[in-house]
Amino acid sequence: MLALSLPGLAMASTVRAQAWPERPITLVIPFAPGAFTDAVGRFVASALTPRLGQSVLVENRPGAGGSIAARSVARVAPDGYTLLVGTQGTNASNASLLRNAGYDPINDFTPVHGLAKIVGTLVCNPARPWRTVAELVADAKQRPGRITYGSSGSGTVQHLLGEMFRLSAGVDIVHVPYRGSAPALTDLLAGAIDLMFEYPNPGIENIRAGRIRPLAVAAPERLDGLPEVPTMAEAGIRGVEAETWFALFGPRGLKAEALDRLARETKAIVASEEFAAFIHRQGASALMLKDQALRDFLASEVAKWRGFAEASGFRLD
């Protein structure tokens, strides 16, 4: 009887060892609730929960342009129970722009699957007098240091677009960082700041309601949802283009069982009609990348922002 039971016990032990996940998973969002990063993360968490048979719990850890969240995930055990919604900031530009990010965006993480990408639109409070980028630039040159722009945090694309605009236009405008784009937008609507590079949603909704005024799109082509708004290049300011992207990451050395399952389930979510409808409402598009294609994309993004830092001399403390 003992001889017969031993193989069965060994098999049961192997099954238990491979039964990932066996408990709830934490998905860390590097910005405050209300931002697009938060919306994407919550959608993915909700969709992963029934697919994995375990709760995927969202935890917002804002601060330092997403670096606080990224550092925390980089240091956890690679067992698949703590994941990160990484962004252009956390997993590309911060490494080149922050003097001490505290982590390596390539070597300290395991990329799982791409999620989405989105571009920003330069908008202002409608009480301000500018109706074109040219009018804004002329006013900024007459009043150096008096015009403010907000962002979701230092080192985020919203901040970097503001710096690109400042350098390309040759104007002195002042950056006001927030712990997410939602509080920045709140202050823009209230008139506490003058400008920001806002994303299509809630940007388009607020534009149509007259609560904010669009000046230019930071993309090579006009947005379908804002066909009347020129690109930055059309407005006379070149080199002010950047995408914000979002992808799912684990810490370095993420165990194979977790990586394979997460990549497979996330791919199905990103390819679903429900996700397509969700990101369309947000004015975004899917980032359908995984494996080597995703790793190559991340390496190119790190190189791009390193080039920007070297060419401009721009750094963050």
Image (cartoon, grey):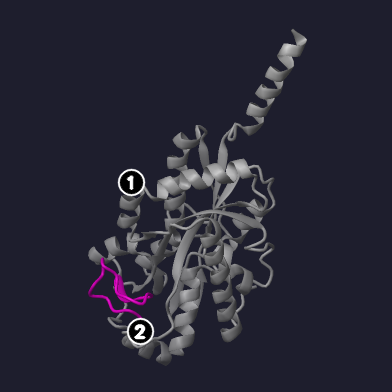
Image marks 2 and 1: residues in contact by CB distance under 8 Å? no
Queried whether the magenta region covers residue 55, the answer comes back as: no
Q: Earlier in the sequence, mark 2 or mark 1?
A: 2
- In the picture, measured across the screen, residue 103 lies left or right of residue 59, that is right
State whether residue 35 is above or below residue 272. Answer: below
- Helix, strand or loop at disc 1? helix
Per the model, the C-alpha gap separating discs 2 and 1 is 34 Å
- In the picture, measured across the screen, residue 133 lies left or right of residue 143, that is left
Queried whether the magenta region covers residue 223, the answer comes back as: yes
User: Which residue is labeled 1 in the image?
Assistant: 274
Q: 124 or 26, which lies in front? A: 26
User: Alpha-carbon neighbours of circle 2 within 10 Å: few (<14), some, or many (≥20)?
Assistant: some
Q: How many marks?
A: 2
Q: 2 or 135, which lies in front? A: 2
Image mark for residue 143? none
Q: Position of residue 53 (x, y in %)?
A: 50, 32
The answer to whether residue 314 of the structure is visible from this angle is yes
Q: Position of residue 69 (x, y in %)?
A: 60, 55
- In the picture, measured across the screen, residue 179 lies left or right of residue 139, that is right
State whether residue 176 is above or below residue 87. Answer: below
Q: Residue at x 36, y 60 (%)?
A: 284
State whether residue 126 is above or below residue 50. Answer: below
Q: Position of residue 185 (x, y in %)?
A: 40, 63
Amino acid type at circle 2 is: Ala
Q: Position of residue 200 (x, y in %)?
A: 33, 64
Q: 195 or 45, which lies in front? A: 45
Amino acid type at circle 1 is: Glu
Q: Which residues are magenta?
A: 213-232
- Helix, strand or loop at disc 2? loop
User: Which residue is labeled 2 in the image?
Assistant: 233
- Between tags 2 and 1, which lies in front? 1
Q: Residue 235's image quarter? A: bottom left
